[in-house]
Image (cartoon, grey):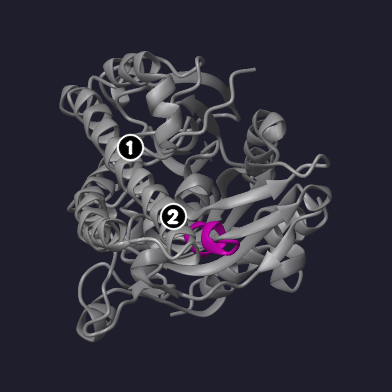
């Protein structure tokens, strides 16, 4: 199997044709033009390094010659003068190398991962490929918007949340809030039973740690910045978990490391006006259980399927119809080598909406964050990292409401009843 070490300049140097072919599949003409420029800068950088190294070797050689001349009581003035001129030449070569190194880093942090061969070629989300469907789809156009149902029955308060925090936030109330917690416990128990370790991460990350795990554009487009601090609110627990072993070498025998992350998530983006803004589907703050794996390169594609299967089992047990979609080249973003989405059926709109994202990032995050493992022969290699939503509760809650709302009450899926003190339905709180 061809195992990619993306963001490693040696990989780009030795596989420039592959990098260009991948960018063509992505229809990314701008970055396609970067490759030759990157390779030219890399060549100039290595020449500057060689010059500096050659000068340092020459300095050492002359220093030794001076010692010998002095020991022999011979005239060393010429060699001493020659040695005195070298530090400035070395500094000049190093000064030439420094900005070139910075430029190489700039390009490498923005070039996308190499896509797996099974990723479909397409221009945008309309060309994503459906892998499979599950469950019975039911259309319920007569339903009021889910936000109205929640307010009418006293299960949520959007008006007062807007007064406190602005649009895109909500108060959950009573048994419906308990249902949110039940979803988290249900997903966690399922993952823990499969060998995943529960992680409660920091909800804040500094920019250096964040830059190793995600697209740098997210800083401006998605994440909340803390004023006067080098800290960002996390968009998902994937990010602090991915940065957890930054600049570390993991023992091979400890791999795979499988985490189940529990956190609130904070995102500046918001959903479509009139559908999501007065609701809970796509909001600024929500709770999520995230799966994350560090593994050996040869195991990552097996774990990609495992993560997807875990999420499918959760949504199947909730009695929700869904489909799995293989994300195409024009819709995948720069971090993943391959990504599946799980899209749940929304009865009121009679359409699928994305609720789970499942990605194999191969070594992309590991190279950026410098996370390696040591093999038995003492050599080192980059780990592969994978992530997948197990459940984003606000999105699942909407699907449960639209699917299981009957006669003014929400029928609680059987799998959640033990976490709801045995209750089988949620009645209006009003």
Residue 120 image offset from top left, x and y in percent: 42, 15
Which of the two residues, 351 or 328, is positioned nearer the viewer here?
328
Which of the two residues, 280 or 46, is positioned nearer the viewer here?
46
Give the side of residue 373 with respect to residue 154, left or right: right
Q: Where is mark 1, residue-wise?
A: 46
Residue 166 image offset from top left, x and y in percent: 20, 76
Look at the image and tell me whether residue 142 can be seen. Answer: no
Magenta region, residue range: 238-246
Q: How many numbered marks does the figure carry? A: 2
- Does residue 54 sit above or below 199 in this rendering? above
Q: What's the distance in space between the residues labelled 2 and 1, CA to CA?
A: 28 Å
Task: Specify which label sits upstream in the sequence, 2 or 1.
Answer: 1
Give the side of residue 110 with respect to residue 199, left or right: left
Quarter of the image that includes the N terminus: top right
Q: Is residue 230 magenta?
A: no
Dot 2: what SS? helix
Q: Where is mark 2, residue-wise?
A: 65
Q: Is residue 245 magenta?
A: yes
Residue 360 image offset from top left, x and y in percent: 55, 36
Dot 1: what SS? helix
Which residue does the image show at 38% across and 47% down from the upper left? 53
Look at the image and tell me whether residue 78 can be seen. Answer: yes
Which of the two residues, 53 or 144, is positioned nearer the viewer here?
53
Q: Quadrant of residue 336?
A: top left
Q: Which mark is residue 405?
A: none
Give the side of residue 256 with respect to residue 289, left or right: right
Which residue does the image show at 50% across and 21% down from the upper left? 116
Q: In which quarter of the image is residue 142?
A: top left
């Amino acid at each position: 199997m061809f195992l990619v070490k993306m963001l490693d300049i040696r990989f780009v140097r030795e596989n420039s044709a592959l990098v260009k072919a991948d960018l063509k599949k992505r229809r990314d003409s701008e970055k396609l033009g970067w490759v030759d420029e990157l390779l030219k800068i890399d060549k100039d950088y290595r020449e500057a390094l060689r010059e500096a190294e050659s000068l340092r070797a020459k300095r050492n050689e002359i220093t030794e010659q001076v010692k010998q001349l002095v020991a022999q009581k011979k005239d060393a003035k010429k060699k001493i003068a020659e040695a005195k001129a070298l530090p400035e030449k070395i500094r000049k070569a190093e000064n030439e190398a420094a900005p070139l190194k910075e430029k190489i880093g700039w390009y490498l942090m923005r070039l996308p991962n190499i896509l797996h061969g099974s990723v479909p070629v397409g221009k945008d989300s309309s060309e994503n490929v459906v892998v499979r469907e599950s469950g019975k789809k039911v259309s319920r156009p007569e339903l009021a918007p889910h936000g109205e149902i929640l307010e009418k029955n006293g299960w949520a308060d959007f008006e007062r949340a807007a007064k406190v925090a602005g649009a895109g936030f909500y108060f959950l109330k009573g048994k419906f809030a308990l249902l949110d917690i039940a979803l988290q416990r249900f997903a966690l128990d399922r993952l823990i039973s499969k060998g995943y370790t529960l992680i409660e991460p920091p909800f804040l990350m500094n920019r250096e740690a964040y830059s190793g795990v995600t697209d740098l554009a997210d800083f401006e487009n998605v994440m909340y910045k803390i004023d006067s601090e080098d800290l960002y609110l996390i968009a998902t627990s994937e990010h602090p978990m991915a940065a957890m072993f930054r600049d570390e070498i993991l023992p091979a025998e400890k791999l795979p490391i499988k985490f189940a992350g529990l956190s609130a998530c904070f995102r500046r983006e918001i959903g479509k006006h009139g559908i999501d803004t007065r609701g809970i589907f796509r909001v600024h703050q929500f709770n999520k259980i995230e799966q994350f794996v560090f593994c050996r390169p040869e195991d990552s594609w097996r774990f990609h399927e495992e993560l997807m299967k875990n999420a499918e089992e959760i949504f199947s047990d909730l009695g929700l119809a869904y489909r799995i979609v293989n994300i195409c080249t024009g819709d995948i973003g720069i971090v993943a080598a391959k990504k599946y989405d799980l899209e749940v059926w929304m009865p009121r709109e009679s359409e699928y909406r994305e609720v789970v994202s499942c990605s194999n990032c191969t070594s992309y995050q590991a190279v950026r964050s410098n996370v390696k493992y040591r093999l038995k022969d003492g050599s080192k290699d980059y780990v592969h990292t994978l992530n997948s939503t197990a459940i984003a509760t606000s999105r699942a809650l909407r699907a449960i409401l639209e699917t299981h709302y009957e006669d003014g009450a929400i029928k609680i899926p059987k799998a959640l009843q033990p976490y709801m003190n045995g209750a089988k339905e949620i009645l209006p709180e009003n």
